[in-house]
Amino acid sequence: MIKFDKLWVVMEQKGVTTYALREKGGIDSKTIRRLRNNENMETKTLDKLCKALDCKLEDIAEYIAD
């Protein structure tokens, strides 16, 4: 399972709100809900997140074995 728990930590550290992700990062509210629930994400969405937060993928997501 891919978990996005690190995403919220990075957002807090950088002072980025979900509103800012929606407005500046082009991430819609449905996608933010899916991120909170650790649901599947398209790679283009992960790319947008990394660009918006100026980070690497491993900074916002991690693989947890079932």
Image (tube, rainbow, N blue to C red):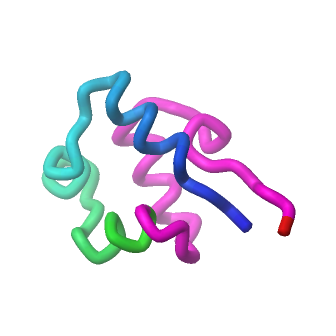
5 over 15 or under it: above or below:
below
Residue drawn at (51%, 57%), measured in percent from left and top? 46
Quadrant containing the N terminus in the rendered view? bottom right
Q: Residue furthest right?
A: 65
Quadrant containing the C terminus in the rendered view? bottom right
Task: Give the percent coordinates (x, y) of residue 42.
Answer: 54, 72
- Region in magenta: 36-65
Task: Give the percent coordinates (x, y) of residue 37.
Answer: 47, 70
Q: Nearer the viewer, residue 41 or 10?
A: 10
Would residue 32 be counted in the magenta stretch? no
32 over 56 or under it: above or below:
below
Q: Nearer the viewer, residue 60 or 54?
A: 60
Task: Give the percent coordinates (x, y) of residue 29.
Answer: 23, 69
Task: Give the percent coordinates (x, y) of residue 47.
Answer: 50, 53
37 over 63 or under it: above or below:
below
Q: Residue furthest front?
A: 66
Q: Residue furthest top?
A: 13
Residue drawn at (58%, 65%), measured in percent from left and top? 43
Residue 59 is left or right of residue 23, and the answer is: right
Which image quarter: residue 35? bottom left
Residue drawn at (21%, 41%), measured in percent from left and top? 17
Would residue 43 be counted in the magenta stretch? yes
53 over 49 or under it: above or below:
above
Residue drawn at (61%, 43%), measured in percent from left and top? 57
Residue 1 is left or right of residue 8, and the answer is: right
